[in-house]
């Protein structure tokens, strides 16, 4: 999952010219706002591997404090061009990132499934456990067991709710799960598994 690969994707393709494009990230907005409703004191959300997604825009208008993290500088630049100083930006490989604060919500749509190596999956879980406060949540969307075996030319792992709950079990409890079917801009259907996991104290 190199920076070079992902940066080239966003530098050379239009926003709606990638399989994961969504005009509105409706499932993400629904799951984040249900798990941790907005309050007068802004809740802190980090969108892991945010790409050019408009989730940050949607959550900012609902009163959340949003941090956008991605390994691709061109992706982060496209979000920053829309939101400027309304959001916080981190350009880093998530597995090399050292969180300096904690978040109420860790959101990941279509990033975790690029981790096909169990060691990397475990490192991701440890990182999420460090970055999410007790009582906070991980909202995670990955390819489902009948989902694609590759995306953007890279192999993908596929998960159901039980396998995700087991992977996160040392630190997180499964709150809810659902199946969602994403339709790509060219009409292909991609089944996703979504889970909300709560960080144990
Ligand atoms: C399939 S796209 C999904 C983008 C976005 N979450 C969405 O739903 O539109 C995967 C994203 O993960 C980012 N990514 C991949 N590997 C990463 C890593 N190791 N660290 C941080 N970001 C990564 C890519 O740059 C890309 O933006």
Image: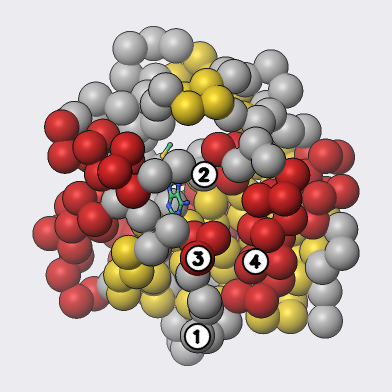
Q: CA distance from mark 2 to mark 4?
A: 13 Å
The reply to whether callout 1 and callout 3 are in contact (CB within 8 Å) is: no
Q: Residue at x 31, y 27 (%)?
A: 18
Is 182 in front, or is 164? 164
- Label 3 neighbour load within 10 Å: few <14, some 14-19, many 20+: few
**In the image, residue 42 lies at what x, y percent?**
45, 82
- Label 4 neighbour load within 10 Å: few <14, some 14-19, many 20+: many
Q: CA distance from mark 1 to mark 3?
A: 13 Å
Visible residue check, residue 118: yes
**In the image, residue 17 lies at what x, y percent?**
24, 25
Q: CA distance from mark 3 to mark 2?
A: 15 Å
Callout 4: CB less than 8 Å from ligand 1: no
Callout 2: CB less than 8 Å from ligand 1: yes
Q: Residue at x 32, y 38 (%)?
A: 5
Quadrant of residue 71 within the rendered picture: bottom left
Task: Residue 128: give its label.
Answer: 4
């Amino acid at each position: 999952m190199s920076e070079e690969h992902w940066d080239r994707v966003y530098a050379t393709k239009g926003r709606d010219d990638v399989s994961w494009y969504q005009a509105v990230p409706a499932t993400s907005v629904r799951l984040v706002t249900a798990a941790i409703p907005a309050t007068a004191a802004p809740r802190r959300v980090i969108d892991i591997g945010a790409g050019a997604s408009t989730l940050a825009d949607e959550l900012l208008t609902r009163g959340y404090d949003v941090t956008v993290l991605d390994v691709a500088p061109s992706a982060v630049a496209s979000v920053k061009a829309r939101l400027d100083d309304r959001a916080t930006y981190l350009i880093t490989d998530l597995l090399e990132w050292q969180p300096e604060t904690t978040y109420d919500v860790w959101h990941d749509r279509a990033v975790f499934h690029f981790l096909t190596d169990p060691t990397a999956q475990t490192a991701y879980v440890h990182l999420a456990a460090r970055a999410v406060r007790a009582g906070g949540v991980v909202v995670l969307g990955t390819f489902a067991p009948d989902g694609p075996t590759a995306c953007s030319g890279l192999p993908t792992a596929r998960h159901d709710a039980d396998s995700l709950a087991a992977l996160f079990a040392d630190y997180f409890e499964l709150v809810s799960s659902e199946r969602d079917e994403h339709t790509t801009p060219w009409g292909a259907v991609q089944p996703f598994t979504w889970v909300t996991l709560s960080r144990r104290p």
